[in-house]
Image (spheres, rainbow, N blue to C red):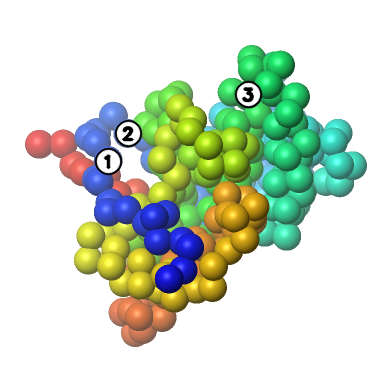
Amino acid sequence: MGFFWFWVVGFDVLGPADYIAFVQDSDGDSEPEANGSAPTPDPVFDTDEVPYAILELVAACVRFVKDTVGIDLDFSSDTLPLVDHYLATVRADLDERHEAAPLILRSVGAYFGEVVRRHIEGFWIVPNEDAHLWRVCSSRAFLSVNPLGAAYDALYDGKEHDGPPSALHLDKPDEQFVNARLEALPDVNEADYHRLSVRFEVIEIAIGALRDRDGADGEVTFEADDYIEPSN
């Protein structure tokens, strides 16, 4: 049996009208405006309507990783092993600097979410300032994930934490199908299991399986309203 199955859960529809969705075409090429107190985004931010709070956090992650490993992140999945290395580097330091963990987790979660969003042609749903409720949703298949939860798992190497769940959220009928696809995969080395680079591969496989299964019907696209339960 493959080692990925518990990363999939049924989808609980998000809650009512106070949810704010920020939808971004992954091909967008304009830059967001910066305000006085926020860092000016680098041209690598080829986004248009990504929440500015996300851009600030992503900029912080890019800076943290550059300061640690000396390499710029470019939002490709190939950069995720660098982020994994960064987390492994700071893990021991956080035993004595607990106060630094929230910013690191939010920043890494935002960067991971942006890498995923661009790859799955997705968008952010941000209910409020609580990053535990943030999600990246696919427009190509009914799938969402909390990238902050993935960052918690990666930083704490699967140990118990107070972060959000990181499992994939799917439509109920798709749950068994994706589970079966993931269970068929070879087992992952336990030391690598919670890495963001491995988590990305799981998301990629799940999206691909859903798209391949849907075939001609795969041209259906999903929007924020599909992920949010309308208020009565």
Q: Amino acid at mark 1?
A: Leu
Q: Amino acid at mark 3?
A: Ala
Relative to 203, is 48 above or below? above
Q: Residues within 10 Å of mark 2 (few under 14, many from 20)?
A: some
**Which residue is denoted by mark 2 in the rendering?**
19
Q: Is residue 64 toward the left or the right of residue 15 in the image?
A: right
Assign the N terminus to one quadrant of the image: bottom left
Q: Is residue 87 visible?
A: yes
**Quadrant of the rendered image containing residue 15:** top left
Q: Is residue 57 visible?
A: no
Point out residue 195 in the picture as x, y percentages from the top left corner. 62, 50
**Which residue is denoted by mark 1 in the rendering?**
14
Relative to 19, is 30 above or below? below
Q: Amino acid at mark 2?
A: Tyr
Sequence-earlier tag: 1 or 3: 1
Assign the C terminus to one quadrant of the image: top left
Q: Residues within 10 Å of mark 1 (few under 14, many from 20)?
A: some
Give yes or no for contact between labels 1 and 2 (Cβ–Cβ under 8 Å): yes
Q: CA distance from mark 2 to mark 3?
A: 26 Å
